[in-house]
Amino acid sequence: MSGKKREIRPKPRLPKGMRDIDAAEIRAVEQMLGTIRQVYESYGFEPLDTPAFEYTDTLGKFLPDQDRPNEGVFSFQDEDEQWLSLRYDLTAPLARFVAQNYDGLPKPFRRYQTGPVWRNEKPGPGRFRQFTQFDADTVGTDNVAADAELCMLAADTYKALGVPRGSYTIRVNNRKILDGIIESAGIDLRDANNHAKRLTIMRAIDKLDRLGLGGVEQLLGEGRKDESGDYTKGAGLEAAQIAKLIDFITAARGDGGSGAMTRSDVLNAIETHLGESATGRDGLDELRIMDELLSAAGIGADQIAFEPAIVRGLEYYTGPVFEAELTYSDGGDAPSLGSVGSGGRYDGLVARFKGVEVPATGFSVGVSRLYASLQKLGKLNADRASAPAIILVMDKERTADYYKMASTLRVAGIRAEMYLGTSGMKAQMKYADKRGAPCVIIQGGDEKARGEVTIKDMILGEKLSQEIADNQEWREGQPAQFSVKEGELVEAVASVIARHGGSKPGADK
């Protein structure tokens, strides 16, 4: 006797480092992106979109050179056996676009772009393999004013999103200064054998906020084992070299933290560490120009500060680099929400295609991280007033009447939905509550006979149920349920939505 063959079903599961996004977050993020887009447009940047994947060799020399180049990126081969990779960021595809269309573009070329990027890296808390960026870049000028402008753009972006002055800081450094410090530590960067060591040093310093000074010292030395047991090989520097680098990256801390020092103070502190490095002094001069421009614009160190520990981990940066940080509250020792945006100058990226240097600089907002940070700051609230009004089906024989109500509301610019299930009123009310509906519309036989509809304000009803202590207080309070004539349906629903912060129909026309 043979038994039935067992059906094999796939297990519903998310790939590691991925996540699903619900309607409330999607709407809040779209609103946030709209605000960022307005700021970018106000600076004269134009939109551009590039494909999700590129030829792997297009994405940059920072990718590992392997038979299967799949470390750091997700890659596959096409029918011609050429390697393609999902874009690692939005900058490398921009460099390809500029090189491909260079002769027809205005110089400088200014563009903004938003979209998902993918990184084949170890996921962790708040660290996903797919996330969204929103970039602004200026390509075709080596004028350091372009770098200063992007820092101002970043500050204006956070201001437009409702982050008060004192709750954000744009921290700036220069890769040339970092190269100068490395050279002054006795490491000859003209020697090709030190190329990998330089990158390891940069990435070690870039982890300061996450690992602290102790972790950075380990990565500058022999290496570090993390909590999971994974071992990261270090730069192999000598103790004196490590001490010199640590002294440099802490140079702006002073006695009261980096915020207690002016940008000029920080530049003076940096200069004492540079020695005779021409590269480092070139980077210092660029920061002095940026300081002059920022000061002329009335922007202080509480908004845009110079910070020697800012490095940025990607290899292609060549000049000023910057990172945006949010805090929980105004100034002081408020806990950091971490980096929510970053960028810098990358003068060599387009040159990979054209053979001549095409200077460029850019700033990128980390959309998912910024969304989470703005939530913690209380700048993003769930907009229940934007959810649809739900029309309950009290009599299935009158489905056409309920459809007509829904259509009337939609024509007036109000989101509306007729209940399409088969359950009774209690289940329909639970459905409306789960949908986050601002109100439900009820018309049974009695209401129909009177030519009326009943509207229940779900948001007010929830609030009253939490605040009212007894039946008398309920009767004396503002009713969460009321009746109106059929012809007053649109006006009544619109008033409920407006009461809770939604827009009245036609308000944006």
Image (cartoon, rainbow, N blue to C red):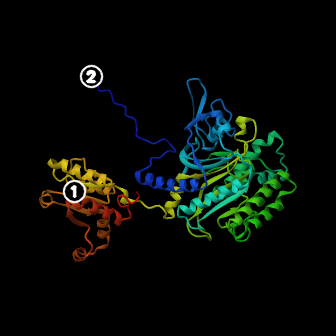
Label 2, on which residue?
1
Left or right: 358 in relation to 120: right
Q: Residue at x 76, y 38 (%)?
A: 356
**Which numbered tag is attached to residue 426?**
1
Q: Is residue 238 visible?
A: no
x and y, in percent, of residue 307 in the image: 71, 60
Quadrant (top left/top right/bottom left/bottom right) for the N terminus: top left
Q: Earlier in the sequence, mark 1 or mark 2?
A: 2
Q: Which of labels 1 and 2 is toward the front?
A: 1
x and y, in percent, of residue 205 in the image: 71, 53
Which of 215 and 264 lies nearest the eye of the viewer? Answer: 264
Residue sitting at the far right: 276
Left or right: 253 in relation to 88: right
Which of 407 and 219 lies nearest the eye of the viewer? Answer: 407
Q: Residue at x 58, y 23 (%)?
A: 80
x and y, in percent, of residue 124 in the image: 55, 49
Which of 244 and 310 lies nearest the eye of the viewer? Answer: 310
Circle 1 packing at 10 Å, graded few (<14), some (14-19), many (20+), is few
Q: Quadrant of residue 10?
A: top left
Quadrant (top left/top right/bottom left/bottom right) for the C terminus: bottom left
Q: Residue at x 21, y 62 (%)?
A: 454
Name the amino acid type tagged 2: Met
